[in-house]
Structure formats: C-alpha cells, structure tokens
Amino acid sequence: MHILDEKPGRTAMVNGKGYLLFSGYSYLGMQHVPEFIALVKEGIDKYGWIFPSSRISNTRLKLYEECEALLCSITGKAGTVIVSSGFTAGRMATEKCKDKLINIEPSHPAIQGNMQKIITQGKIFAVDSVDIFNAAITDFSFTGKSNQKKIIIVDDSHGIGVIGKNGEGIASALPQKEITEYIITYSLSKAFNITAGAISCSKPFANELRSMPAYTAGTAPSPALLYAFIKGAGLYAHQREKLKSNMHYFQSLISHIDSIIFHKQLPVFILPEMTDEKALFKKNIVISSFAYPYASGKKIKRVIINALHTKNDLELLAQVLTETFQQKT
C-alpha cells in the first residue's frame, strides 16, 4: 500500500520522494493538462462545482442534456442518462433486467447478477468490454449464435475514451443485428477524468431509467467537470494519440519478454505472478499490485501506461523489467 502525497500523473510522491508511476486508471492524464484545468475553472465560474438539486426538479441546467447528447454521438446510441458514477450506471441498468440477467465473464461487480458461462437463448446478458486483469477485449461473436432477440448490457468503463478510432469505446466494434439491443454502461473517470457515469441505450430504456430513484433523487455530477468534458474534445483527442503512441512504443520495448501479456489496443500489461513489486519500488517504480474484487484473493500485478509518460520513462521501465526477468530465467 502506497499513500500518495499529491495527485498522481506520470510520477507519484510517496513520503516526499518521487517515483515513476505505472498504476491507476487516469489513462489520458487530463488532470495534468493545463488547457483542461483551465476549462474546469471556466466551468466553476459559470456553473459552480456542484448543482445540489434533484434531477427532476423544476429548475435544471441544460448542460446535462447537452452532455447526454454528446455521449449519444460518441456511442452511436439514441439515448443517454448521466448519473453519479459508473458503478451506479451499471447497477441501474441491471436492476431493470435483474430477473432475466445472465452474466458472462468478465463482469464487473456493477453489472453482476447470476454468473453463468453457458449461453442460453432469449435472455439478457451482461459482460465487460475490456478485461483489465487479463489485458483482453471481449469477443462479441456470441451475439450471432441464435436468431432470438438478445439484450446485452456492456460495461465499457475501460474502453470508452481509449479504444476505437475516435475513442468511442466498444460501440463501433459491436456486431450489429436488428434482433440485438445493446445497453452500454460506463464510468467517465477512467479516460475522461470526470466523476460521473452514464448509460447509453435506446430512448425508451433511457426514459425508464429516468424514473428510477437512483436518478431522480441522486445529486448530479459536477457541472464544472461536464463543461470541461464538452469543451475538451480536441484535448481528449490529442491525449489519446499520445497514449496510443506510448502504448505502441512500450509494446515494442518489451516484445522480447514472453511472460508479459498485453493487447495492442490496451494500455495494460500483465506481469508474471512472481514479479517482486518491492524490488521495483526500490528502483523508484510503482506498479499496480492488488487483489480484486476481494482483498483476500491473489494479487494481480500490472503495468499501466498513460498519456503523460515520456519515452525515457518507458525505456527505463522496459530496462528494469528486462533485467528482472532475465534474472529469473
């Protein structure tokens, strides 16, 4: 456990000392982009940092509808509902379908119901788009295995903003069939650095979600952050290109280490179980190393690249990992 002294980025301060940081899910590093910080400040001046009102109050900010429209255009869905977090988004979507829900691995706890591995017909399925613990993107070919209508809830928290040509996440890669309806839930924090979540879906389903207490009685996300999200499209695109460049460069640097698992579209690199994170820490490197979803489970050790890392950072990490695994062989 490392207690950080200040906001992390490409580095982290631990007890007053700087370390290279390869952990956390701030994929695009927006908290360290001056232009984005300026947009947040503009948003505070215009809207305040919080709008403490029910979502169904007779006084509302049109900003929320503007943001939902933007997310519709990003995901290609007709309706979007913004809520306080990605976890809330997942729970709301699955609550509407809980009696018929069947989970497919991998499934984040936010969308979990009855975990089953056998695909049955005429049901509602829930699955993550990205398996961050195995560096994999889910294969959705199972959607075409029958001609019965399917509803598939997809948690795209680790995909949206990162994968896809324009950061649209899994949406553009989902097999399109008239008999398949996709409900996409996601956190806006992982790539976009916004403390909010959303469900992108059909308009009728969005209207149903807006009748749920989690929406009607919940405090809306910070309007200042949503303002920055709306205005920061160009900044996100720039950071996404930097992230992709870093991913591809690091992949080339560690391609000779067979024991590191990665996917070319993801900034997550799975290290062997025997990796000694304490030895890496002594070399001023912090990696991701914890058990999930249960603290008593086996630790999953990973390197997570973000858009802020420099080539020197990545070269140093690759050199240390090469030396580490050469010693083990």
Image (spheres, grey):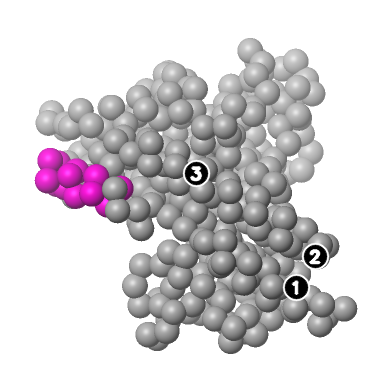
The kind of secondary structure element at disc 2 is: loop
Circles 2 and 1: CB atoms closer than 8 Å:
yes
The amino acid beneath tag 2 is: Ile
Figure check: 87 above or below 272: above
Horizontal side of 7 relative to 74 (left or right) equals: left
First-in-chain label (1 vs 3): 3
The answer to if 93 sits in the magenta stretch is no
Residue pointed to by mark 3? 240
In this orientation, does residue 52 appear? no
Residue pointed to by mark 2? 257
Of residues 272 and 175, the one drawn nearer to the viewer in this rendering:
272
Whole-angstrom CA distance, mark 2 to mark 3, is: 26 Å
In this orientation, does residue 328 appear? yes
Residue pointed to by mark 1? 322
User: What's the residue at 58%, 22% (across, down)?
Assistant: 181
Q: Quadrant of residue 279?
A: bottom right
Whole-angstrom CA distance, mark 1 to mark 3, is: 27 Å
Residue 67, how many percent across, how many down?
32, 31
User: What's the residue at 13%, 28% (across, down)?
Assistant: 58
